[in-house]
Amino acid sequence: MMSRAVCLLGCLVLCGHVCLAQAVTVDSVEAAAAAGKVEKAFALAAKLIEQEPDNRDALTLHGRLAMRCGAYQEAVGSFEAAQFFADTAEAATDLGDALLELGRLNLALSSYRHALSLDDTIVEAHVGTGRALVQLGSDKSEARLCLESALAIDKDSTDALLALA
């Protein structure tokens, strides 16, 4: 007959293996996304955030996957949290992109401008600023300058070229 201690140890080992099998990493989320399993990657990213709610990379990854799945409001939450942990131009640009998709144009514009105040070499922030200005019905010359600034940084920026067309 098995002693209680051996049984308990066996249960702990078994539980440990089960818990380890359920652990999610940024790499596993990225692998699922790279394999074209975007919705699975999105679900895994949500589990990763449950495991590590202060992981800025996980929050950013979750937000970007939310965008790809059309879950823009959820993306806003993830990007706001990521920006809380590290106020970077990339985080502000991602937030601007999600807000723009939701039609929250003034907030998107503010987020893009904040991104550019942190790093004026972010092509996506220039493009986003230009797109937001156009959608707001602002002076088109300012929007054009933003898009031309994006092209000055990256002459092959498809997004800037399309927005100028």
Image (tube, helix red, strand yellow):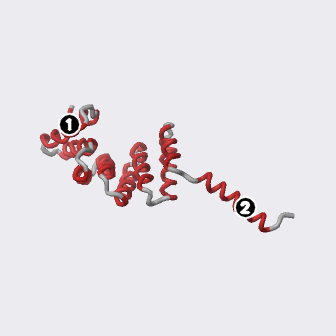
What x and y, as percent, mark residue 120? 23, 47
Task: Determine the image quadrant of residue 14.
Answer: bottom right
**Quadrant position of residue 85:** bottom left
Q: Residue at x 12, y 40 (%)?
A: 141
Distance (Cα) linking label 1 and label 2:
62 Å
Q: Quadrant of the N terminus?
A: bottom right
Q: Residue at x 48, y 50 (%)?
A: 45
In the rendering, at what x and y percent does residue 30 appear?
48, 44
Mark 1 secondary-structure assignment: helix
Q: Secondary structure at mark 2?
A: helix
Q: Is residue 68 in view from this perspective?
A: yes
| Vertical arrangement, residue 46 with respect to residue 33, above or below | below
Along the polypeptide, which appears first: circle 1 or circle 2?
A: 2
Indicate which label's residue lies in the foreground, 1 or 2.
1
Position of residue 88 relative to residue 69, above or below, is: below
Residue named by callout 2: 11
Quick one: 65 or 85, which is closer to the camera? 85
Name, please, the residue furthest toward the bottom: 4
- The residue beneath circle 1 is 152
Residue at figure coordinates x 24%, y 41% from the top left: 127
* Of the pair 27 and 110, the residue shown nearer to us: 27
Residue at 57% x, 53% y is 23
